[in-house]
Amino acid sequence: MGTAALAVVPLAVLGVFFVLPVAGMVGRGFWTDGGFDPSASLEVLTRSRTHRVLWFTLWSSTVATLVTLALGLPLTFVLYRLRVPGRSAARAFVLMPFVLPTVVVGVAFRTLLTPSGPLGFLHLDGTAAAIIAAMVFFNLAVVVRTVGVLWENLDPRREQAAAALGASPWQVLRTVTLPALAPAIVASASIVFLFCATAFGLVLTLGGLRYATVETEIYLLTTQFLDLRAAAALSVLQLLVVTGLLYAAHVTRSRREHAVERADVRSTLRPARRTDLAAVSTAALALAFVATPIAALVVGSLRVGDGWGLDHYRALDGHEAGSTAALLVPVTEALSNSWRVAVDATTLAMVLGCLVAVLVSRRGRSRAERRGLAVLDGVFMLPLGVSAVTLGFGFLITLDRPPLDLRTSPLLVPIAQAMVALPLVVRTLTPVLRSIDPRQREAAESLGASPWRVLRTVDLPVVWRPLLAATGFAFAVSLGEFGATSFLARPEAPTMPVLIYELVSRPGADNYGMALAASVVLGLVTVVIMGLVERLRLGTAGAF
Amino acid sequence: MRTTTKNRWPATAVAATAGLVLAGCSLGTGDQDDAAGGSAEGGSSKEVVVATHDSWNMSKQVLRDFEQQTGYDLTIQPAGDAGALTNKLVLTKGSPIADAVYGIDNTFASRAVDEGVLTDFTPKTNPGSAYEPQDAEAAAQLTPVDYSDVCVNVDDVWFKEHDLAPPTSFEDLADPAYDGLFVTPAPSTSSPGLAFLAATVAEYGEDGWQDYWQRLVDNDVKVTAGWSDAYQVDFTAGGGSGDRPIVLSYASSPPFTIPEGETKPTTSALLDTCFRQVEYAAVLDGAANPEGAQAFVDFLGSRELQEALPDEMYVFPVDPEATLPDLWAKYAVPADDPATLPESEIAAHRSQWLEEWADIAQ
């Protein structure tokens, strides 16, 4: 059957670049001294420290996910349904945190929160609240983007009808709007949760080592202690938790997934009303929350000695860098390296992501087929929930001989990033694809349209905008990704995050200022690219 | 409206094709930029691959000279910090990711040697023989390239403003007069942090350091995850607006704090609190190109490379004859008598120390 054939390519890629490396690392931990001995590993799971770490991982990620939704949904509403000035600029701006390297954000957050910093009076330095705040900062974009692409096309007439029948705004939201958006909300919440649960740089930096998550434990056990047994046990634990979460998300989602009436974007936008006050003020709060650390970055990058200036930006071209500057390459070269990697990663993620999304959004005819599709759907989310350390070290020990002698190939970095971007692409496209009434496709088929033509005339007009959104998202993931890539044997050409990391790892006010300046440049480039994509999207409005 | 859809479709196809073509280009050009000026002849026997830590940085000119002198094409493969680098080599034993390694330090040296991932090699000119590992087997495999002294640094301006004499010794750091003033990265997540822990073990002994650390904790020492965090955020003379004038850093850090238009640094290193980190290079066991690897290890001892080390990687060359940059010669002074521990002792006790440390300080 055609479905099976479509699944082969993405499954093969996942098998080679995810299942094989992870299995390799876990295997190393379980097979010790030539024998299969998982009991030694599993002993780790009975330690009270492990329980504490698991508990912190679960609750901090849950709280961070809930806060992200609480801030993100009103923001999405304002940016995708209301005709407010600066809408598209704000949409692009929200994505900026996504590409900022965690080291710099960690430093920027701590500069604000440290006892002598501008927000020192909050006494948040080194607390769980600081960790959660940073997680929300990074992940707001996930909610806004994933839910936004569905929300902007949601036909307002149903809501209007409910209101005309006497429902209060709150009742309309609860009984009409949220149920229609549920698939996208659940999808974005599961992505946010997985991102939070696997964050390690932030947890270490902002928690001042007082807090440990499953991910930070795996990181320390693998890169510092070389305790592969314990690391393997924790990786398995992580897989189990993630699988459980994905199953729960699937159950929640599939109960609510149904076709929705859609409308042209121009007809869904309306001016803000008095009743929107709560949403608009929450959105403003969310934007201010994103803007504060970014403002700290910008201010820091402009600070030269006791005065202000653009010196750090000028120094990034590498010409006037004195003997004390730790600039690996001129910033333009790092940008072009980043750009090349991002193009590769995005292309790969989009090709695979479209295949998977088209597949899993089909409604299976039999029970078995439906179940198969659901498993397929979940499987492609797994890379988000599994330790980047395990994956990165796994690449080294499994992809070392022909035909898969790829571990030092320059392709490995874009491939690893594509594995991170793939679930975002799938989760952005699938709710939209599933919201298309299957009868539309059936009608087209019965009128003699080929499957290709059905895809082109029914699905594509609806998916075109989400497709661009997903592309932008994948691009941003690649530009900022440093977690997975830092555990690979990287090619020598330094990308922007590498350049920034090196600058911030050296003493000297110049290096620090240049690290901030380079981060601002990376963020601005992203915002400009996303802004252009937004314009492209506006130009293609009106697909029906 | 339907027509709009139709008109858009070819545009999509064009965009998709363009994207794919662009990707094709980028993969092609990706390779060639890597080698430092080397031509990409593909995986011939002329290629020599060197795994390094992430802090590797070397001027293109110097690397080009290596390629011209030896005829090899050099590929550098950064692979994490010293710990991650060592562990990667251990995990890929028998199927090494490179021909040579640079960047294993004395806190991880024993692990690499004990796991048998290196082979014996002593370069013809070995200017750093004074820095060789104490263990004979390790000394036969590892070639010292550079060193850095991890020392406590102080913000002299802050102390002058507060009319307080800066601390000078380990004991001072635990003195209530300096309560809440010291910040250090943690030994579990930072290599200078580990060096400082080793320094306290060397100073106070296997059974005494725990008590010293308890006193540091009582004196409100702040522990951060990484060096950047401690120096750039919490240190008063770092990048931000920190509030701690004592930080763990390097003997080579002060020259970076010379204000624009002035000649003297505003910070100084306490040379009685230093631990010496030595970085080594070695030929990997099972290297595809052992001759190339040897040539590179040889080259690391050359005067040209040794003299480039301070500016490129912020470390002291092991060659005593190498000329230091002016600022270094004046303000980056290595310790006379730094603390050291045998590599094998660090390797044997690292996990235990870190666990005990976590119980005290976390």
Image (cartoon, rainbow, N blue to C red):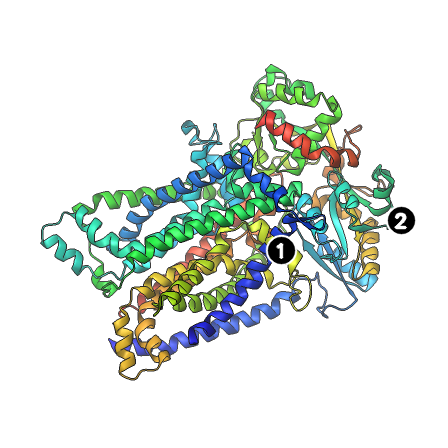
- Residue B255's x, y, as percent? 67, 36
Badge 2 crowding class, 10 Å Cα cut-off, few under 14, some 14 to 19, many 20 or more, is: few
The C terminus of chain A, quarter of image: bottom left
Q: Is residue A505 visible?
A: no
Q: Residue furthest left?
A: A165
The answer to whether residue A61 is seen in the rendering is: yes
In the picture provided, is B144 more to the left or to the right than B7?
right
Provide the residue designation for mark 1: A24
Mark 2: which secondary structure? loop
Residue in the foreground of this view, choosing between A434 and A195: A434
Q: Position of residue B66 (x, y in %)?
A: 79, 58
Say what amino acid the circle numbered 1 marks.
Gly
User: In terms of secondary structure, where does tag 1 sit?
Assistant: helix
Indicate whether B21 appears above or below A69. Answer: below
The residue pinned by badge 2 equals B125
Residue occupying image coordinates x 55% and y 47%? A235
Determine the CA span between mark 2 and mark 1: 41 Å
Instruction: Identify the residue shown where x is 48% and y is 64%.
Output: A349
Q: Position of residue B252 (x, y in %)?
A: 70, 36
Q: Chain of mark 2?
A: B
Labels 2, 1: front one: 1
Q: Position of residue B283 (x, y in %)?
A: 80, 53
The residue type indicated by label 2 comes to Thr
Question: Is A443 situated above or below A178?
Answer: below
